[in-house]
């Protein structure tokens, strides 16, 4: 079970916003390797981030499978160039996927540079988060939820 | 792996529909997609071949209501059923929270069912999961066909551990939501147990 608390989310969101500003990108997405969206920034209105997250995670999983077949640990990055939009995909701390969508307002070089910095920041945050979670266990939402609540959720017919 | 986001107040879970080729995994998702109101579902994605066989996966994000102010969101995936897509099947099981095994009830597909069930167990083990400890349900699909095996026989062969099981006709929707609700409920109960 992965858990993200409000203050952790705020810290991650701030890093993602900063990357969006610094890289001049269109949008940034942070996704876990199972395809769940963690944070996003930029021009995401009209963008189906749920589908994008799932497909990107599938893509990274398939690429990871190819790496394994070739006895590589992983391919850390991917870049796809479109007519209008480009996409840069990288893996942070072996478990989070960082996606940058960008157009001609910036360059691949700048994106790569800023991604490298943001990756380090995110990695540090993830390490802090896992330390915090080991030291202090916060109350889980599932402490409030009863079996009857779960039953009720499915008793609509 | 489930993902609980206290900021967006969401509980996200992953359910995988597994089973032999042409058993009706994609049909289950299509029926759910067609019968769910637009505000409770996202876009359904099918990565399929030109002949509409699943190549990598189908994906359907679904909301199933609120619980104590948290939205419950389920990401439904299917695997490609054809034997030679095993590498892809394995990838999709990563981080799974609940499994639906869709069996093809036709007598002549029994060997394919058993092979797929063995394959499910093996692929889960590769990810460190034990099928007997996961939220897991079985669906006997295509019960309307004249060559469908009797339910008792299907249960004996395909559900020796006696997990919740359902007969279904996915093309017409019989048993589709019953199966989904059963596995979703098991997933939430398991999360509660593991808290």
Image (spheres, rainbow, N blue to C red):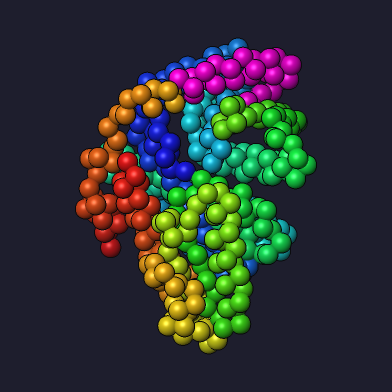
At horizontal 52% and vertical 23% (from top left) the residue drawn is A41
A62 up-or-down from A11: above or below: below
At horizontal 38% and vertical 27% (from top left) the residue drawn is A134
Q: Position of residue A25 (x, y in %)?
A: 63, 20
Front in this rendered view, residue A63 or B32: A63
Whether residue B34 is visible to the viewer of this picture, yes or no, is no
Left-right relation of A154 to A122: left
Q: Position of residue A27 (x, y in %)?
A: 58, 25
The extreme right residue here reads A70
Q: Position of residue B76 (x, y in %)?
A: 49, 52
Look at the image and say whether residue B37 sits in the magenta stretch: no
B50 up-or-down from A13: above or below: below
At horizontal 37% and vertical 67% (from top left) the residue drawn is B164
Question: Which quadrant holds the C terminus of chain A?
Answer: bottom left
At horizontal 69% and vertical 23% (from top left) the residue drawn is A103
Front in this rendered view, residue A98 or B98: B98
A98 up-or-down from B140: above or below: above
Whether residue B98 is visible to the viewer of this picture, yes or no, is yes
Front in this rendered view, residue B142 or A94: A94
Question: Which quadrant holds the N terminus of chain A?
Answer: top left
Task: Give the residues in magenta.
Answer: A100-128
The extreme top residue here reads A22
Q: Position of residue B77 (x, y in %)?
A: 53, 53
Look at the image and say whether residue A125 sits in the magenta stretch: yes
A16 up-or-down from B66: above or below: above
**Chief SS of the magenta region:** helix
């Amino acid at each position: 079970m992965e858990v993200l608390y409000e203050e952790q989310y705020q810290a991650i969101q701030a890093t993602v916003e900063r990357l969006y500003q610094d890289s001049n990108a269109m949008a940034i997405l942070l996704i876990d390797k199972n395809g769940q969206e963690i944070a996003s920034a930029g021009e995401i209105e009209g963008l189906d981030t749920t589908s994008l997250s799932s497909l990107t995670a599938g893509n990274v999983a398939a690429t990871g499978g190819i790496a394994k077949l070739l006895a590589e640990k992983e391919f850390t990055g991917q870049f796809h160039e479109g007519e209008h939009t480009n996409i840069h995909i990288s893996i942070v701390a072996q478990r989070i996927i960082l996606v940058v969508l960008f157009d001609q307002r910036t360059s691949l070089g700048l994106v790569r540079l800023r991604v490298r910095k943001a990756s380090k920041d995110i990695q540090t945050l993830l390490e802090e988060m896992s330390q915090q979670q080991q030291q202090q266990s916060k109350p889980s939402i599932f402490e409030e939820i009863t079996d009857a609540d779960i039953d009720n959720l499915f008793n609509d017919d | 792996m489930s993902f609980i986001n206290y900021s967006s107040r969401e509980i996200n879970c992953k359910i995988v529909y597994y089973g032999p080729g042409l058993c009706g995994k994609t049909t289950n998702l299509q029926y759910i997609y067609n019968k769910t109101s637009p505000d409770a579902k996202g876009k359904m994605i099918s990565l399929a071949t030109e002949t509409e066989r699943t190549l990598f996966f189908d994906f359907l994000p679904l909301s199933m209501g609120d619980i104590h102010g948290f939205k419950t969101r389920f990401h439904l995936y299917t695997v490609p059923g054809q034997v030679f897509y095993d590498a892809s099947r394995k990838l999709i099981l990563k981080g799974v929270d609940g499994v639906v095994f869709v069996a093809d009830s036709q007598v002549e597909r029994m060997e394919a069912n058993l092979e797929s069930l063995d394959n499910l167990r093996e692929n889960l083990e590769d990810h460190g999961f034990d099928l007997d400890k996961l939220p897991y349900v079985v669906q006997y699909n295509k019960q309307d066909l004249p060559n469908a095996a009797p339910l008792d026989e299907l249960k004996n062969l395909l559900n020796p551990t006696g997990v919740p099981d359902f007969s279904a006709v996915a093309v017409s929707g019989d048993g589709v939501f019953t199966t989904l609700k059963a596995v979703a409920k098991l997933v939430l109960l398991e999360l509660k147990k593991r808290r």
